[in-house]
Each structure stands twice: as structure tokens, then as C-alpha cells.
Image (cartoon, grey):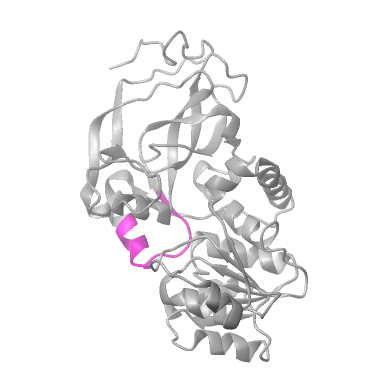
Amino acid sequence: MVDSRPAGGDGASRDKESAVSIPVTMRALQQTSFGGPQDSGVTTDAPVPNPGPDEVLVRVVAAGVNFADVSRAHGTFLGGPQPPYVAGFEAAGEVVAAGEAVTGPRPGDRVIGVGDGAFAEYMVLPAAAAMPVPEGWTAEQALGLVVNRPTALAALKPLGHLAAGETVLVHAAAGATGQAAVTLAKHYGATVIATASPSKHETVRALGADHVLDSRDADLAAEVLRLTRGAGADLVLESAGGATFRASLAAARPVTGRVVVFGVAGGEASITNRELVYEHQVQIIGLNIGVLMQAAPRIFGEVTAELATLVAAGVLTPARPTAYDLADGPKALTELEARATVGKLALVP
């Protein structure tokens, strides 16, 4: 079926320049409960969304898989959607329609962005937040430019205040955000200590990490202190959570050491004010890239401008995600949760 309805609702209409036939229904990966990724599956009759006045409708070419998708599937992501819902939030593709107030991007433009319902054939994005896919890059290669790489850069620079010559400890260094962090930290002149499971060490070394440690080592903090001659890491990028969070605190340089926390993959961890005074005299900084976009748009603007410069300079090169069919979304999410993956993952509708 081909949709002949107005696209924006309440007077908004699909852009007249678009000659693309837009169906009424689509394939989508629907999360049916908070039982985890296994409680999701493909439906063929999900309604194609209509863009609002300030939104664009995108034909999804590739959708990015992130650990936040796993958290949403378990109901542990703060403010996440309630089931049943179309899963995913990061996608790249082609604009096929635009709301009446949109002046750009236009139908035919290739964009990447963040919005609800990315694991589908179509999704809507706020027009102002739809970022162009870099020239010469495919949609799949652009995945990570609006989630993983901005997170890594924000953690290193405006929040982590990284300076050349400092030592950075990067956890989960074989993941999409971790790989970006290693690449960027080396570009900015840091010594990088990375952690990953042994099967992923060669991948991390190839990115330029100076030292690679076993992420499951019970003496992780002691190893970092040994490598830094007792000084500790100047900056720690902490996304692992759980017991690793304690190692991150112990591995940071006292007083001037910064620990930027942007993930809880291994579970929650806590620290008391007493511990900050008597055990871990470090600076702890929380990072949620979505909150950064909304609460500190100037800082996020600096991050995106720097990313564009790094892409143009070839420092950040096209991603090479592992692609899964949309129907294999539960498998991709389960493997990500089990830490059995390397780099960026993509779903192709």
C-alpha cells in the first residue's frame, strides 16, 4: 500500500519535491516487554510515522546498535520507552519527506541522527538534529557519529580536560565508543592504557593503545599504578560499572585525576562522601550525551564542530560496523550484552 495521507498531521504535508512512494506500514523490531532483547521481534505492520512540522521522515538504510538499547530492553534506562515500542534510536538514511516548517535537510539528502524507533524501515528525526552523512561515506559507515564518537570526544576534552602528555585509562576499549576514545586520545598526545578481554587485545593495539590490560584482571588498578610508576591515570573513561568502577577510582591520580562516567554496563556502583575524602580523592564527572545536547548546547556544539574537523582531517575514518539483518536484532543485542562483539554493530532493515 502507498500512503496518500498528509505526512505532518494538523496541516503539515509531505514535501512536494519528494516523488518517493511511502508505504503505510513497515518492518520494525518491536520490544514487547522488559524481559530483555530476547523479548523483541520483527513485525511487518508497524505504522510508518508521520513527521511533525519540524521533523523529517527518513528511510533507514542502517541503524546503530548501542548498549542503551539493551538497557531499554530491560527497563533500566531512565526515561526509556514503555513496551510495546519500536526499538532503537540511532539511524542513518535518506530523507523522503519533511514537515511544513523544515527548511533543511530536504528530501534526497543523506542524514544520520537520533530519535525514537530506529530499528525500522522508516523513522522521524528532528530536522535540526539531522546531521549530514560525510561526503564519500555510506550510511553504515556514518553510524557512531552522533552517539559513540561524540561521547568519546566529550569525555576526553570538554569534560575530561585531556592535555598532551597525560595518561588515559579507557575501559571497554574494543567497543565503538572505546575505539573512538583510543583513537582520539592518541591524536591529542596522550598515553593510552586500554582494557579489553584478551581476544580483543590485537584490535585495541592496532588503534595505537600503548598498553592493553585484561578487563577481567582482579588487580587492574595495581597494573595501572605499575605502568604509571605509582602516579595513577590522569583521566579514566569509565563505562564498565560494577566492580570495575572501584578499580577506576583506585587507578586515578589523587586530587587531579578525573573519572568520567558514561556507562553502567556492568551494573551500578556507589561511592560515599567519606570515601571521597579519605580513600579516593578524585574528580568524578557524569556524562549522558543526550543530557549534554539539551542542557549544554554550547558545549555540544563545540564537540560536533571538532568532530567535523577530525573527519575532514582524516583522524576519524569511516566506521566498519558488523551488520545484522533487522530480524537478527535480538541476536545482535544479546551478543552486545554478553560483550561478545567488537566495534560498532548495525541493523539493516
Q: Residue at x 33, y 21 (%)?
A: 23
Q: Is residue 142 visible?
A: no
Identify the residue at image location x=51%, y=41%.
Answer: 139
Q: Quadrant of the C terminus?
A: top left
**190 up-or-down from 333: above or below:** below
- The answer to whether residue 336 is left or right of residue 310 is left
Quarter that holds the N terminus: top left
Disc count in the image? 0
Residue in front for this viewpoint, 125 or 139: 125
Question: Magenta part of the protein: which range?
Answer: 333-346
Residue 153 in percent (x, y) is at 64, 57
Instruction: Tell me the residue at 25%/38% (across/down).
Output: 84
The image quadrant that residue 121 belongs to is top left
Quadrant of residue 282 within the rendered picture: bottom right
- Whether residue 297 can be seen here: yes
Q: List x then y, in percent, for residue 127.
A: 56, 27
Residue 173 part of the magenta-drawn span: no
117 horizontally vs 31: left or right: right
Nearer to me, 335 or 271: 271
**Horizontal relation, residue 14 to residue 276: left or right:** left
Viewer-proximal residue, 133 or 182? Answer: 182
Q: Point out residue 277 in the picture as x, y percentages from the top left corner.
A: 60, 78
Which x, y percent locates residue 14?
47, 14
Residue 26 falls left or right of residue 115: left
Image quarter for residue 4?
Answer: top left
In this rendering, the answer to whether 23 lies above or below 311 is: above
Q: Is residue 313 above or below residue 88?
A: below
Residue 342 highlighted magenta (yes or no): yes
